[in-house]
Image (tube, rainbow, N blue to C red):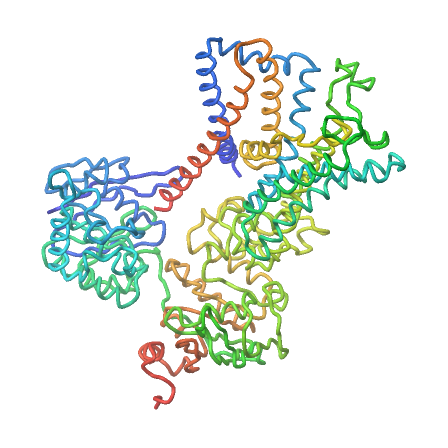
C-alpha cells in the first residue's frame, strides 16, 4: 500500500472518534459556562491529576483497566458480527467464579491459586457468553435480547447468594469475607519500585493492568495472525461467505461469544483479586455497558479500545476533582461520556455513508 | 429539443472517469450508450442529469448553454432519468409515487383526482398498462419500473435516460419496455439507453455511442452496427464470441445424482426426481428459467443443502452427509451465483479473499497461525497467474470491477486443481473482454480433465461451452440434450415447458 493510502486509511478510522471528542468538549464547555464556571479551568482540572503526578496517572490507568476488558469483550464479538451487551452479567459471573474458587480452595499455594482464579474468572464470563451464543447459533434467537436477560440473571443470582448465603458475618455491607492471602494481588503502590516512582501506598493500580495489556496484544494477534481470527472476521463481514467457505459458523459463533464473555469475566481478576479482595454485591455500576462505549469509541480495534479506555479513565478520575473543587457536579462526566457515544455513533454512520457514496461515484 | 455535450470531463481521485466527451442528441431518436464496466457511461449521464458537476466542458440545450446544478435543474429543462435502482415508496399507491415531490394541490391539499388523471393520461398515451391506485408493494419489478417512467413523464421530460433498464426485468418485461421506448421516440422524445447488452442495442438503437476508459470512441448507426464491431470498439481489440473448443474427451463418471428430491417450505417441491451424471473432462450445463431448481442443485452438490430424497454419488461413493467443508475436501470448487455476498468478502483485501475456504493451507502457516506476508505472496502469485487487473494485493475486493471480482473467485477456486467446478452464472454482469477469458479458462480446464457443472441463464453461453445440457423445468430434469445437436430455439422451447417429455419427436 502506498503511504498516501495508509494515511488516508488512518484518517478514515480516526476522524469519527476525534470529531466526536471535539464536539463533546465543545458542548461540555457550553454546559460548564452555563453553570457559571470557566470551561478551560474545569477541563484542566479533569486532566490535571492524571497528567501531573505519577500517582494520578496510575489512578487513571486503574480506572481504565476494567474498561479495557469490557471494551475488548464488545469489540471481539462485534468483529464476528455479534452485539454482546451482556458484559455486565459476564463480569459478575467472572468475579463470582474467581471468588468461589478462592473460597473453596483456601489452602492452595500461590503459584496454583492465582492461575486457577484467573481461569475461573475467564470461565465464568465465557459460560455466560456462550449460552446466548449457542441460542443464537442453534435457534437463531437474537443475542442482544439474550445477553440483556443474562445480565439480570447474573446480578440476581450473585446478589441473592451473597446477601443470603455468603455475606461476611456481622457485616451490614453485602460482601463476602476476604479471600485467602494466596489469591490476593497487591497494588504497585505497595512495592518498593512503586513507591520509588511516587505512588501512594493506597494506590489501587496493580497487575491486572498487565493482564489487560496482554489481552489487548492477544486479541490483536488473534485477529491479524490466526486462522480463527480470519474466520471470525469473515463471519462478521459476510456470514454467507463464511458458510460458503466451509466454516462451521455455529461453532464459530459460540466460540466468539464465549471468548467475548471470558474477556469481560477477567474484570473479576481486577475487582476481586486485586481491588477489593472480595466480592461486593452490585459492584460494577455499569462497567459492562461502558465497555460498549469504549468499543465504539475505539472502533472495535484493540489499540483503539486501549486508547478509549484511557480517555474514559481520565474522565472518571477527573470527575472526583471537579466535584470537590468546582460548582460543576461530577455527573457532567457521565453526560460527556454519553455525548461521546452519541457523537461517535453519528460520526461513524456519517463516515460509512460517505464511503458508500464515494464508492458509488467511483463505480459510476 | 437538441442537446449538445461539449468537452465534458470529470475526475475522481485516481481516475479520469469522463475525459473530453462531446456528443449531440436530437429528438425522436433512440441512442444507446455502451461500454465496459467503468467506461464512464453512468458518470457521463450523471453529468447530463445534474447529479454531478463537470470539471470541464458545458452542456447546451437548443444552442443555449445551461447550468445543471442538480437533478431539479435538469428536470426543469426536460431531462429525466430512470435509475437502475428504483426510488419508490412501498406503502404509497402507484399514482402517489408518481406525483411525490411535485403533487398537484387544491386548497393546500393533494388533489388526488388530478394526480390519478395525470397518471392515467400518460399511461394510456404510451400504453404503460398500469393501475394508478395499485399499492406499490403489489407491483412486479416491471410495473415498478413503469411507475418510475411515469414519474419522469409526469415532470415533463423530453429526453429520457435509462440506466441498465433490463437488468432486473424478465425477457417478457424487457419486450414490453422496448415497445414503450419505441413509442417515446415516435412521439418525438429522445431516449438514451445505457446498457452493456449488445443484442438490445442492435435491436433498438438508432445510434450507438461507444465509450472506453472514460473516452468517447465513436458513434455507429444502429443499422450498420454489429456485435463484433461494437465489442471491438468497447474493448479496443478483437473479441471472440464463438468459443473455440475441440471435442470433449470425457473420462469416468465423477458426479451422479440419483432421484434427488428436495422439499421447499411449505409443501412445495423444489426438486423432484432429478437424476444426471457428469464425467471428468466434460462440461454439463443446466438450462432453465430462473427459479426452476438451479440454485437448489448447486447448493446440493456443494454441500450447502442436503436432499430429502435420493442419493448423491461422488467418485463412485454415496455421500450422504456432504457439507461445504466436506465438498471442498473432495475437490468440489464453487463459483457461487451471488459473487459479492457469498463468493467474496468485499471489505477484505485481495489476499484474504484469495484464501477464503483455504485458510488452513499449511503453506500459509501452521498450528492455527496465518502469516500475512505468506498470504500476500500467494495473492501476488495468483493475481499474476490469472491476469487480474489489480495494482495491489492489499486493495479491497470491493474496488475491483465485476469482471475482475469474478476472475478473483475463479483464481481461488481453480488454484487447487479441483475435480469438479460448480459455476453459477459465471459471466453475469461481467464485461465482454472478461467473458471471453472466463470461457477460455473453463474450456482449458475441461481439456485438462476437470468436470464442470455450469448454470447459466444465457442459452448462447450454454450452447457455446457445454458438451451436454440438462433442462430444468419446475424442479424436474425435463431432458438431457447433446449440445452439439441443439440450438437456442429448441432450448428455448424446452425451458418454457413447451416441449414436455413425451412431446419430443
Q: Is residue B182 above or below residue A328?
A: below
Determine the image quadrant of residue B483: bottom left
Q: As rendered, which of B171 and A316 lies closer to the eye?
A: A316
**Residue B375 x/y as whole percent:** 61, 49
- In which quadrant will I find the C terminus of chain B? bottom left
**Residue B73 x/y as whole percent:** 19, 38
Q: As rendered, which of A176 and A120 lies closer to the eye?
A: A176
**Residue B436 x/y as whole percent:** 41, 63
Determine the image quadrant of residue A216: top right
Residue drawn 10% across the image and 54% down it: B188
Q: Is residue A357 above or below residue A280?
A: below
Residue B225 lies left or right of residue B415; in this view the side is: left
**Residue B312 x/y as whole percent:** 57, 76
Determine the image quadrant of residue B481: bottom left
Residue drawn 46% across the image and 26% down it: A19
Count the marks. 0
Residue A319 lies left or right of residue A360; in this view the side is: right
Amino acid at each position: 500500500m502506498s503511504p498516501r493510502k495508509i494515511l488516508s486509511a488512518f484518517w478514515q478510522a480516526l476522524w469519527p472518534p476525534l470529531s466526536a471528542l471535539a464536539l463533546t468538549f465543545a458542548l461540555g464547555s457550553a454546559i460548564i459556562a452555563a453553570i457559571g464556571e470557566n470551561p478551560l479551568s474545569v477541563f484542566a482540572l479533569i486532566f490535571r491529576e492524571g497528567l501531573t503526578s505519577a500517582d494520578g496517572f496510575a489512578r487513571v490507568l486503574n480506572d481504565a483497566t476494567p474498561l479495557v476488558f469490557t471494551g475488548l469483550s464488545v469489540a471481539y464479538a462485534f468483529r464476528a458480527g455479534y452485539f454482546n451487551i451482556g458484559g455486565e452479567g459476564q463480569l459478575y459471573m467472572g468475579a463470582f467464579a474467581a471468588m468461589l474458587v478462592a473460597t473453596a480452595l483456601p489452602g492452595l499455594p500461590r503459584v496454583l491459586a492465582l492461575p486457577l482464579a484467573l481461569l475461573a474468572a475467564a470461565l465464568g464470563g465465557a459460560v455466560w457468553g456462550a449460552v446466548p451464543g449457542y441460542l443464537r447459533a442453534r435457534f437463531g434467537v437474537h443475542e442482544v435480547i439474550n445477553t440483556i436477560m443474562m445480565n439480570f440473571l447474573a446480578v440476581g443470582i450473585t446478589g441473592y447468594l451473597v446477601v443470603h448465603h455468603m455475606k461476611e458475618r456481622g457485616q451490614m455491607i453485602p460482601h463476602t469475607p476476604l479471600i485467602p492471602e494466596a489469591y490476593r494481588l497487591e497494588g504497585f503502590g505497595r512495592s518498593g519500585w512503586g513507591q520509588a516512582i511516587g505512588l501512594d501506598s493506597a494506590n489501587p493500580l496493580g497487575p491486572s493492568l498487565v493482564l489487560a495489556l496482554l489481552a489487548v496484544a492477544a486479541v490483536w494477534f488473534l485477529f491479524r495472525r490466526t486462522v480463527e481470527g480470519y474466520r471470525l472476521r469473515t463471519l462478521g463481514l459476510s456470514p454467507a461467505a463464511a458458510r460458503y467457505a466451509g466454516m462451521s459458523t455455529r461453532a464459530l459463533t459460540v466460540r466468539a461469544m464465549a471468548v467475548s464473555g471470558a474477556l469481560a469475566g477477567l474484570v473479576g481478576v481486577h475487582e476481586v483479586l486485586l481491588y477489593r479482595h472480595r466480592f461486593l454485591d452490585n459492584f460494577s455500576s455499569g462497567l459492562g455497558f461502558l465497555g460498549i462505549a469504549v468499543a465504539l469509541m475505539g472502533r472495535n480495534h484493540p489499540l483503539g479500545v486501549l486508547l478509549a479506555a484511557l480517555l474514559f479513565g481520565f474522565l472518571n478520575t477527573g470527575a472526583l476533582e471537579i466535584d470537590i473543587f468546582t460548582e460543576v457536579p461530577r455527573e457532567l462526566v457521565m453526560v460527556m461520556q454519553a455525548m461521546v457515544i452519541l457523537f461517535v455513533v453519528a460520526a461513524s454512520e456519517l463516515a460509512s455513508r460517505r464511503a458508500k457514496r464515494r464508492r458509488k461515484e467511483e463505480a459510476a | 429539443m437538441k442537446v449538445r455535450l461539449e468537452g465534458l470531463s470529470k475526475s475522481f481521485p485516481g481516475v479520469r472517469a469522463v475525459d473530453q466527451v462531446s456528443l449531440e442528441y436530437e429528438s425522436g431518436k433512440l441512442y444507446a450508450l455502451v461500454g465496459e464496466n467503468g467506461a464512464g457511461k453512468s458518470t457521463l449521464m450523471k453529468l447530463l442529469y445534474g447529479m454531478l458537476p463537470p470539471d470541464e466542458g458545458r452542456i447546451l440545450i437548443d444552442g443555449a448553454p445551461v447550468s445543471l446544478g442538480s437533478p431539479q435543474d435538469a428536470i426543469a429543462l426536460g431531462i429525466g432519468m430512470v435509475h437502475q435502482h428504483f426510488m419508490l415508496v412501498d406503502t404509497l399507491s402507484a399514482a402517489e409515487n408518481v406525483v411525490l415531490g411535485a403533487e398537484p394541490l387544491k386548497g393546500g391539499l393533494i388533489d388526488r383526482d388530478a394526480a390519478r388523471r395525470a397518471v392515467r393520461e400518460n399511461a394510456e398515451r404510451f400504453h404503460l398498462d398500469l393501475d394508478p391506485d395499485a399499492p406499490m408493494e403489489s407491483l412486479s419489478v416491471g410495473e415498478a419500473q413503469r411507475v418510475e417512467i411515469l414519474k419522469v413523464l409526469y415532470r415533463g421530460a423530453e429526453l429520457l435516460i435509462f440506466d441498465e433498464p433490463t437488468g432486473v426485468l424478465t425477457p417478457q418485461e424487457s419486450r414490453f419496455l422496448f415497445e414503450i421506448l419505441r413509442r417515446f421516440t415516435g412521439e418525438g422524445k429522445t431516449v438514451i439507453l445505457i446498457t452493456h447488452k449488445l443484442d438490445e442495442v442492435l435491436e433498438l438503437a438508432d445510434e450507438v455511442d461507444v465509450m472506453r476508459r472514460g473516452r468517447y470512441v465513436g458513434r455507429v448507426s444502429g443499422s450498420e452496427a454489429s456485435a463484433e464491431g461494437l465489442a471491438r470498439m468497447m474493448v479496443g481489440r478483437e473479441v471472440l464470441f464463438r468459443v473455440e473448443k475441440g471435442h470433449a474427451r470425457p473420462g469416468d463418471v465423477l458426479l451422479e445424482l440419483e432421484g434427488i428430491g428436495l422439499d421447499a417450505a411449505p409443501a412445495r417441491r423444489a426438486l423432484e426426481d432429478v437424476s444426471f451424471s457428469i464425467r471428468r473432462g466434460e462440461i454439463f450445463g443446466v438450462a432453465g428459467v430462473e427459479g426452476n431448481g438451479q440454485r437448489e442443485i448447486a447448493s446440493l452438490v456443494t454441500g450447502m443443502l442436503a436432499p430429502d430424497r435420493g442419493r448423491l454419488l461422488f467418485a463412485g461413493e454415496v455421500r450422504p452427509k456432504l457439507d461445504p467443508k466436506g465438498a471442498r475436501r473432495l475437490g468440489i470448487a464453487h463459483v457461487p451465483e451471488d459473487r459479492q455476498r457469498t463468493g467474496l468478502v468485499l471489505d477484505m483485501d485481495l489476499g484474504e479473499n484469495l484464501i477464503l475456504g483455504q485458510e488452513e493451507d499449511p503453506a500459509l502457516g501452521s498450528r492455527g497461525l496465518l502469516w500475512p506476508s505468506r498470504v500476500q505472496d500467494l495473492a501476488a502469485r495468483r493475481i499474476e497467474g490469472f491476469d487480474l487487473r489489480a495494482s495491489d494485493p492489499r486493495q479491497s475486493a470491493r474496488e475491483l470491477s465485476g469482471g475482475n471480482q469474478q476472475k478473483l473467485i475463479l483464481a481461488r477456486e481453480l488454484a487447487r486443481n479441483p475435480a469438479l467446478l460448480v459455476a453459477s452464472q459465471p459471466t453475469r454482469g461481467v464485461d465482454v473482454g472478461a467473458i471471453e477469458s472466463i470461457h477460455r479458462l473453463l474450456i482449458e480446464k475441461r481439456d485438462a480433465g476437470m468436470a464442470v457443472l455450469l448454470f447459466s441463464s444465457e442459452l448462447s453461453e450454454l450452447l457455446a461451452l457445454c458438451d451436454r445440457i440438462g433442462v430444468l423445468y419446475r424442479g424436474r430434469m425435463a431432458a438431457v440434450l447433446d449440445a452439439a445437436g441443439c440450438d437456442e430455439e429448441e432450448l428455448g422451447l424446452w425451458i418454457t415447458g413447451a416441449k414436455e417429455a413425451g412431446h419430443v419427436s
